[in-house]
Amino acid sequence: MSGVSDSVRVIVFGRQGAGKGTQCARVAAHFGVPHVSTGEILRDAIARDTLLGRAARSVLDGGGLVEDSLMISLVQGRLGEQDARTRGYVLDGFPRTLVQAVAFDEMTAARPAHCAVDLEVPRDVVVARLLARRREDDTPEAINHRLDLYEAQTSPLIEHYRRLGRLRVVDGVGTQDEVFERVRATVAASLG
Ligand code: AP5
Ligand code: MG
């Protein structure tokens, strides 16, 4: 396991409901780094009715994507904070488009992510998980829209990080403990 002075920098993507939030929280706690979830940041902004929250509310309700420039500056700001600069991060939900990925690669060029984890769970399995969870944006229409957007906008990131040699595909089907062990081992192996 990494020492306190080493940083661990991981991005995680995968279909909505793949278990990113569940696993990122555990991985972040395990390696002692901040869990940065763009979805959580947006939901928090909506709950506090900030300017960001007002801009994001209808987008989240409809299952769409918040515009790239807003998300990029939000993440750049968060990764610039002291904890992320010194310890690293487990980034959950970003990048989610190729534009975001290119911006992310540029902003982290000096210290790139150790790996990009693709948490792979088939579409029918994630639909069942999301309908059971009942978060506010988990209506059948919004779920389907989010999954269509995933295929169109986020799955190209798999090829992008494969070309960069940083992609690690992890099977996300199994118990939460089984999946955690796979993700933990994958991240540990990528730290070199
Ligand atoms: P976000 O919060 O990131 O939502 P999401 O991508 O739709 O993914 P979820 O949080 O729904 O799923 P998850 O993979 O985290 O799974 P979870 O662990 O919850 O984003 C929300 C919205 O914000 C987006 O739709 C978009 O509008 C906006 N947004 C965010 N980032 C953005 C960006 N970069 N650009 C533009 N817009 C952005 O697990 C799901 C369920 O399954 C849970 O109930 C869990 O208990 C259960 N579960 C987990 N693991 C297992 C397992 N192994 N077996 C069985 N059940 C399991
Ligand atoms: Mg999540």
Image (spheres, rainbow, N blue to C red):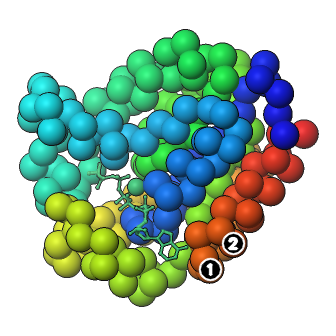
Q: Residue at x 28, y 79 (%)?
A: 131
Give above or below for 176 relative to 160. Answer: below
Residue 120 place in picture, x, y as percent: 59, 71
Whether the residues at callouts 2 and 1 have beta carbons within 8 Å, the answer is: yes
Q: How many marks?
A: 2
Label 1, ligand 1: CB separation under 8 Å:
yes
Quadrant containing the C terminus in the rendered view: top right
Quadrant of the image occupied by residue 89:
top right
- Residue 75 placed where, x, y %? 42, 28
Give the amino acid type for the residue marked by disc 1 in the picture: Gly
Q: Which mark is residue 178?
A: 2
Q: Which percent across, then down, holds residue 100?
A: 45, 38
Q: Quadrant of residue 172?
A: bottom right
What element does badge 1 sit on? Answer: loop
The numbered dot on residue 97 is: none
Residue closest to the eye, 4 or 42: 4
Q: Which mark is residue 174?
A: 1
